[in-house]
Image (spheres, rainbow, N blue to C red):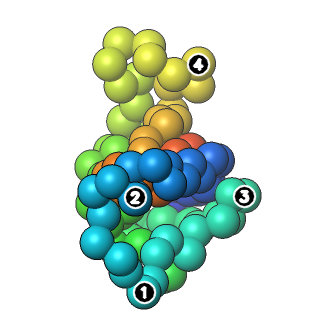
Amino acid sequence: MYDVKITAIRKADYKDLQVQYENPIQHTCDVCEGQEWLSKGGAMPEGMCDSAWESMKSFVEALSRGEGNFYDGWMRNPYSAMISCNDGFRPVSFLLERI
């Protein structure tokens, strides 16, 4: 099994959508651009957001098994993937890389 490095590349913040559609919430996403995690054996790293993990889990598991080349050459590095969490108000883009 391979380790997979997960890096938060970009975090968006759609305030107009929050104002129009979101109920006020106390706690929002804590992820910072540049933050990194390491998945060992395809497992969720400590401190990873549960919702973000659900978005990337199948890709991390596949990379950890040595699989790659998702969608027939989508990524320049065939052993990587760019995945976004499913928060439509504050989406975070994560780069997954087999190491």
At 30% from the left edge and 64% from the top edge, which residue is drawn?
A: 22
Say if 99 sits above or below 69 in the image.
below
Asked whether residue 2 is in view, the answer is no
**Circle 1/circle 2 CB separation < 8 Å:** no
Quadrant hosting residue 25: bottom left
Distance Cα–Cα, label 1 vs label 2:
13 Å
Marks 3 and 4: in contact by CB < 8 Å?
no
Helix, strand, or loop for circle 1?
Answer: loop
Outermost residue on the bottom side: it is 26
Q: Going from the N terminus, do you reach mark 2 or mark 3 first? A: 2
The residue tagged 2 is 18
Q: CA distance from mark 4 to mark 3?
A: 20 Å
Of the numbered discs 3 and 1, the one sitting upstream in the chain is: 1
Q: Most extreme residue toward the top, as rendered?
A: 72
Where residue 20 appears, as percent x and y from the top left, is: 33, 54
Q: How many marks?
A: 4
Mark before the other along the chain sequence, 1 or 2: 2
* Circle nearer the N terminus (4, 2): 2
Depth check, front residue: 62 or 86: 86
* Of the two numbered discs 2 and 3 in the rendering, the one whose residue sits closer to the viewer: 2
